């Protein structure tokens, strides 16, 4: 949570430059880190049913009394907790967003990004110096089941929300029978298309751990018999030909230009003439996007992609060029109304008529 600050103090940091703005960043960085610790130590969940005194909270969370006291005092200072006569309590914002059972909970997002920033961003200088990632992000994720579950849950919940808007925006004829969801993981986007198209079947390609959540999604939706969950590599797994649609949702930003082109050519080779590829991406260089949280997110995310995977957010003109090089025409993009950063880009393989 942004650290509490008086309007006069804020002016000194961001208007008159009498104070270093980086000091606020330091406090906010520590606020973010302590919130991650509160979440992972189970402090917020322990307070879900009401306030607890320090000793009871230490017992619930299995933590050291002094360490916990200093942590909860910091969390109270940052607004995550409150001090009450009955002990420490979750603040209204924490109760609304950081409990795992809260509707639309932010807990998986905070938990995932907290792990990512802690484990990956410590050597940001190195990737910038060398021009590539310092490790294999998805291999790392596959070895951390809890972080992987948070990652896929975060994406699945977004997909459950965006899928409803996306499906009607991707033209699929009544005779459409198959789609391929490359890097489809949690499988929620495939399920959204299957729900709207009763004759459609889906092949979802992803790494083994990621597909575990995909298996749960398709079972819960009752469409397991129409989905082939295919563990394997995006670039090499057999996906067949003659499909109506290939989804590359939040995939191309993980790669540099040459690999993006390879993926798009792979999509083209898997489609029937007249078939479509659909990309979902937070686009870079969108002049109409106002400065604010969305724009800040895309800049942070692009740097994160470069550091962890060697990728970045692409501009629409770059994607249009790449789609053209891969043989696609009629590139159309839509900024979704349900997101201030996600763009749907759909392109068509010429029908050959
Ligand atoms: C950012 S997620 C996108 C998931 C989903 N398409 C969405 O939009 O919510 C990228 C997905 O690609 C998968 N992935 C990354 N590298 C892969 C590889 N080399 N082979 C197969 N899947 C891979 C990840 O496991 C992950 O599920």
Image (cartoon, rainbow, N blue to C red):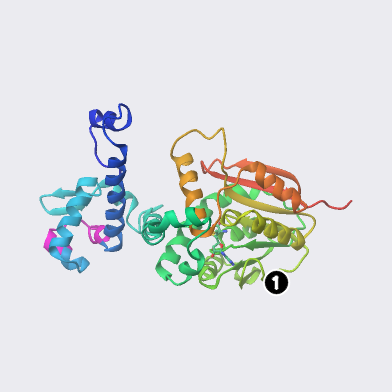
**Is residue 113 depicted above or below 236 in this figure?**
above
Q: Residue at x 76, y 62 (%)?
A: 269
- Decide which of 167, 237 is in the foreground and name it: 237
Which residue has dot 1 on it?
238
Q: Name the quadrant where ligand 1 sits.
A: bottom right
Q: Residue at x 53, y 59 (%)?
A: 309
Residue 261 placed where, x, y %? 69, 56
Point out the residue furthest to the left here. 85
- Decide which of 177, 248 is in the foreground and name it: 248
The image quarter containing residue 273 is bottom right
For the question of whether residue 108 can be seen, the reply is no
Point out the residue furthest to the right here. 353
- Decide which of 186, 291 is in the foreground and name it: 291
Q: Bounds of the magenta span?
A: 43-57
**Is residue 217 depicted above or below 97 in this figure?**
below
Please state if 127 lies on the left or on the right of 193 as rendered.
left
**Is residue 169 depicted above or below 235 in this figure?**
above
Residue 334 placed where, x, y %? 63, 41
């Amino acid at each position: 949570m942004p650290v509490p600050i008086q309007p006069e103090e804020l002016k000194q940091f961001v208007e008159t430059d009498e104070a270093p703005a980086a000091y606020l960043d330091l406090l906010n960085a520590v606020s973010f880190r302590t919130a991650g610790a509160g979440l992972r130590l189970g402090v917020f969940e322990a307070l879900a049913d009401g306030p607890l005194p320090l000793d009871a909270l230490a017992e619930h969370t299995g933590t050291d009394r002094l360490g916990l006291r200093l942590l909860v005092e910091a969390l109270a200072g940052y607004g995550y907790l409150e001090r009450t006569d009955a002990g420490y309590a979750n603040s209204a914002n924490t109760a609304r967003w950081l409990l795992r059972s809260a509707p639309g909970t932010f807990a998986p997002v905070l938990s995932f990004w907290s792990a990512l920033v802690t484990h990956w961003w410590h050597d940001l200088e190195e990737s910038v110096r060398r021009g590539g990632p310092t490790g294999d992000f998805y291999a790392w994720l596959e070895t951390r089941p809890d972080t992987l579950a948070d990652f896929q849950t975060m994406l699945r919940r977004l997909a459950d929300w965006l899928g409803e808007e996306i499906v009607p925006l991707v033209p699929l004829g009544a005779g459409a029978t198959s789609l391929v969801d490359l890097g489809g993981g949690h499988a929620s986007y495939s399920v959204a298309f299957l729900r709207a198209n009763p004759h459609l079947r889906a092949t979802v390609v992803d790494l083994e751990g990621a597909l575990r959540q995909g298996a749960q999604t398709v079972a819960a939706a009752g469409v397991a018999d129409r989905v082939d969950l295919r563990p394997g590599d995006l670039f090499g797994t057999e996906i067949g030909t003659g499909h109506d649609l290939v989804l590359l949702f939040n995939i191309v930003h993980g790669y540099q230009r040459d690999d993006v082109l390879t993926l798009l050519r792979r999509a083209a080779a898997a489609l029937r003439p007249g078939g479509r590829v659909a990309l979902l991406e937070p686009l870079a260089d969108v002049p109409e996007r106002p400065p604010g949280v969305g724009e800040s997110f895309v800049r942070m995310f692009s740097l994160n992609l470069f550091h962890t995977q060697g990728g970045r957010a692409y501009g629409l003109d770059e994607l249009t060029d790449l789609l053209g090089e891969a043989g696609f025409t009629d590139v159309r993009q839509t900024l979704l109304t349900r997101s201030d950063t996600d763009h749907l880009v759909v392109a068509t393989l010429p029908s050959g008529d």
